Image: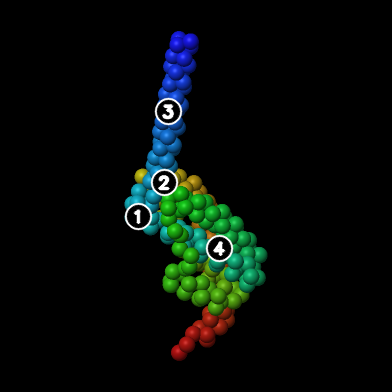
Amino acid sequence: MRSIKLFVLLLTGFCLLQACRGSEKKENTTTLASDSTLDTIGTNSKADLKDDETGFIKQAALGGMMEVEAGNLILQKSKSAKVKEFAKMMVTDHTKANAELKKLATHKGLQLPATFSVEQQKNLDVLGEFSDQGLDRQYMEMMASDHLKTLELFRKAAQFKDADIKSFAANTIPVLEAHYKAANALNNSLQQEKVNNGQDNSNIERDAKKPN
């Protein structure tokens, strides 16, 4: 009987010891998972980005917003099929790029600007004052100029150290190059038409709206 009681006591003690060890392992596992989560958050922190990388994301966001807003304005007001076709491409392509950029910014812990800069809003207001052929020429001239500047911005970003920003910039450059090529060709065509046809009344109409 004593042997049986001793065996039962030893078995009970062994089971309690194993249960304690299992609890310790579970607690250690939870701690490691928590540490891993913190590491991931730290990797995505905006503190890991340099000023020029953060600046690129914000400038690219503002530029993309501008392209979509201007494109929608042209789709509403322009009477040129070619110009409206270009504007539709701007809205489609830049809406897609803006969505990708938003994901990138969120991953990096950045808040994208929600409103235009003062200069951008001024350019949009001026664009809205034109009509007919004057509107088309002003828009295409702006598109050719803006995409040239945007290409320079993205080409610099493609050399950044941050792999995500570098990849986004590099993948977007071919699209921007196609935009610039189309914008430049259409802008040159419209400017030549202006020379051939003489000055129209669109600029006079726009100037008449300016305060003295």
Q: Identify the residue position indicated by label 3 in the image.
A: 20
Estimate the x, y position of residue 50 in percent, counting from the top left.
33, 52
Estimate the x, y position of residue 73 in percent, counting from the top left.
59, 69
Q: Of label 2 and label 1, which has the lower sequence position?
A: 2
Residue 182 sits in quarter: bottom right
Nearer to us: label 2 or label 3: 3
Q: Of label 4 and label 1, which has the lower sequence position?
A: 1
Q: Residues within 10 Å of mark 4 (few under 14, many from 20)?
A: many
Task: Check disc 3 and report its element: helix, strand or loop.
Answer: helix
Q: Identify the residue position indicated by label 1 in the image.
A: 52
Q: Of label 1 and label 3, which has the lower sequence position?
A: 3
Q: Quadrant of the C terminus?
A: bottom left
Q: Of label 4 and label 3, which has the lower sequence position?
A: 3
- The span from disc 2 to disc 3 (Cα, nearest Å) is 32 Å
Q: Of label 2 and label 3, which has the lower sequence position?
A: 3
Residue drawn at x 52%, y 85% as measured from the top left: 209
Task: Check disc 2 and report its element: helix, strand or loop.
Answer: helix
Q: Residues within 10 Å of mark 2 (few under 14, many from 20)?
A: few
Frontmost residue, 177 versus 52: 52
- Relative to 16, say whether 65 is above or below: below
Frontmost residue, 123 versus 11: 11
Estimate the x, y position of residue 131 in percent, counting from the top left.
59, 76
Q: Are marks 4 and 1 in contact (CB under 8 Å)?
A: no
Q: Of label 2 and label 4, which has the lower sequence position?
A: 2
Q: Identify the residue position indicated by label 2 in the image.
A: 41
- Relative to 159, say whether 193 is above or below: below
Residue drawn at x 42%, y 34% as measured from the top left: 27
Q: Residues within 10 Å of mark 1 (few under 14, many from 20)?
A: few
Residue drawn at x 54%, y 54% as measured from the top left: 99
